[in-house]
Image (tube, rainbow, N blue to C red):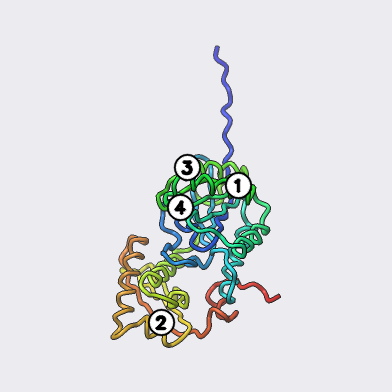
Amino acid sequence: MIEETESKEVPTRCGYVALVGRPNAGKSTLMNALVGEQLSIVTSRAQTTWTRVTGILSEDGVQMIFLDTPGLLQVKDLHQRAMLEEAHEALRDADAVLLLLDGTRRMDAAQETVVRTALQETRAPLRVALNKVDRLDEGAVARLVSAAEDSFGAPVHAISAGERTGLGPLLRDLASLLPESPFLYPEDDIASQPVRFFVAEMVRETVFERFQDEIPYAVVAAVEDFRESEDPVYIQVTLYVEARSQKGILIGKGGKAIRALGAASRKKIETFLDRRVYLDLWVKPLAGWRKKRQHLRRLGYRVPEET
């Protein structure tokens, strides 16, 4: 007679993984690659992530909640202070921390100080990812991995977020750091922010793609109206700029620039929603919004208290 044995259920793991690093290290590209969706905006410019973006990966009994954060930088205005606070808050919330290093750029002493100061915000286990190794030869990768291990005292993974190489071992390592816990989100969820958030981000991403110099950093997008019950979906987005001259640049001669911006943004939003969209864009000056506490709070930023 064969004795029946009780099958033991393998416990699930779940936790927050903070992705931190210098601007343009590849955090957003990495999170999009890990989750399999374009959640964080990605451009060739530095400092395009302005607030924490959450991406969720649930597989093989593990739910990893990735927190893509603004780049760790030396702040120049109140907006950048708010961005840095977003990164620090993610570090405080994290069950595991992944520090991304750009293998093609070396940090100077001041930049490294900013990174090390931020890492003091957490007691979570640290892992390091040396990114963009597809642009380096094997000898350079080996030297940089060894230097990073010595510098940060943590295991280092050589990866390419853009080419999606080296991600399997990295994911398994991160999963091992998470606590045993029920999933915090349904298995099919890939993000925690509302649709309005991603719509605004897609419009802002398009501003970065279509305008040069200072303009993209002076523009913030806010969804004012979202009528999902209509067909096409009606979405009104206001682009706030710091100066009236910037409003003129965004609109362009005869409205040419704003029409092109709207058409490109609408295409992204329709792909994201899988529905037809009527995108109604407005441009309004909000003088000095990057430097004024009340404006930043109105736009949804968590501004640190004055010290």
> Which residue carries the number 2 mark?
283
Report the Cα–Cα distance between label 3 and label 1.
20 Å
Q: Which x, y percent locates residue 139? A: 48, 44
CA gap, disc 1 and disc 4: 17 Å
Counting residues from the start of the chain, the first of labels 2 and 4 encountered is 4
Mark sitting earlier along the chain (3/2):
3
Q: Label 1: how many residues lie within 10 Å, few (<14), some (14-19) or many (20+)?
A: some
Disc 1 to disc 2, C-alpha distance: 48 Å
In which quadrant will I find the C terminus? bottom right
What amino acid does circle 1 point to?
A: Glu
Q: 221 or 166, which lies in front?
A: 166
- Mark 4 is surrounded, within 10 Å at the Cα level, by few (under 14), some (14 to 19) or many (20 or more) other residues, namely many
Whether pointer 1 and pointer 4 mark residues with C-beta atoms closer than 8 Å, the reply is no
Label 2: element kind: strand
- Name above or below for residue 239 compared with residue 113: below
Q: To which quarter of the image does residue 261 belong?
A: bottom left
Q: Looking at the rendered structure, which numbered label has been put on residue 149? A: 1
For the residue marked with disc 3, what is the amino acid?
Gly
Mark toward the start of the polypeptide (3 vs 1): 1
Q: Quadrant of the N terminus?
A: top right
Instruction: Indicate the amino acid at tag 2.
Output: Val
Residue placed most toward the observer, 171 or 43: 43
- The residue under label 4 is 132
Secondary element under disc 4, as helix, strand or loop, is: loop
Residue farthest toward the top in the current orientation of the protein: 1
